[in-house]
Amino acid sequence: MIKLLTLLLSLLDRVFTEWGNAKQQAQGRQDAQEQLDANVAKAEAAMDVDDPARLDRLRDRFDRARR
């Protein structure tokens, strides 16, 4: 009887451990995806911002190339 109870407890422990690990992995994936989405949004925002100094450098470069 005690062996049966020990076996059941060990099975429950394994089930709950695996369930907890799966939940942590899913949460980790979700956190990573959220961080990736935030980084992509930052990069897209940085590309959309006009940089007057960069535009001047590009104009100068093209003007020099035409000469």
Image (spheres, rainbow, N blue to C red):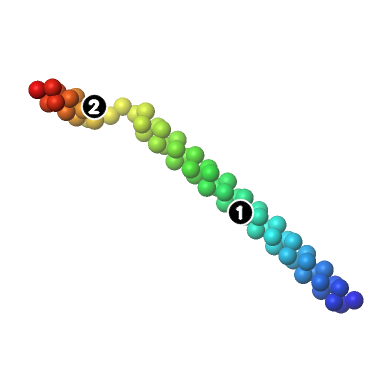
- Amino acid bearing label 2: Leu
As helix, strand or loop, the secondary structure at mark 2 comes to helix
1 relative to 7 in the view: left or right: right
Crowd rating for badge 2 (residues with CA inside 10 Å; few <14, some 14–19, many 20+) = few
13 relative to 23 in the view: left or right: right
Quarter that holds the N terminus: bottom right
Determine contact: label 1, label 2, CB under 8 Å. no
Quarter that holds the C terminus: top left
Q: Residue furthest front?
A: 66
Residue 2 at what x, y percent from top left?
A: 87, 77
How many labels sit on residues?
Answer: 2
As helix, strand or loop, the secondary structure at mark 1 comes to helix
- Residue position for label 1: 25
Residue 13 higher or lower than 58, as above or below: below
Where residue 43 sits, quadrant-wise, is: top left
50 relative to 43 in the view: left or right: left
Whole-number angstrom distance, CA of label 1 to CA of label 2: 45 Å
- Residue 41: assigned label: none
Crowd rating for badge 1 (residues with CA inside 10 Å; few <14, some 14–19, many 20+) = few
Among numbered discs 1 and 2, the one appearing first in the sequence: 1
- Residue position for label 2: 55
Residue 27 at what x, y percent from top left?
A: 60, 50
Q: Residue furthest bottom?
A: 2
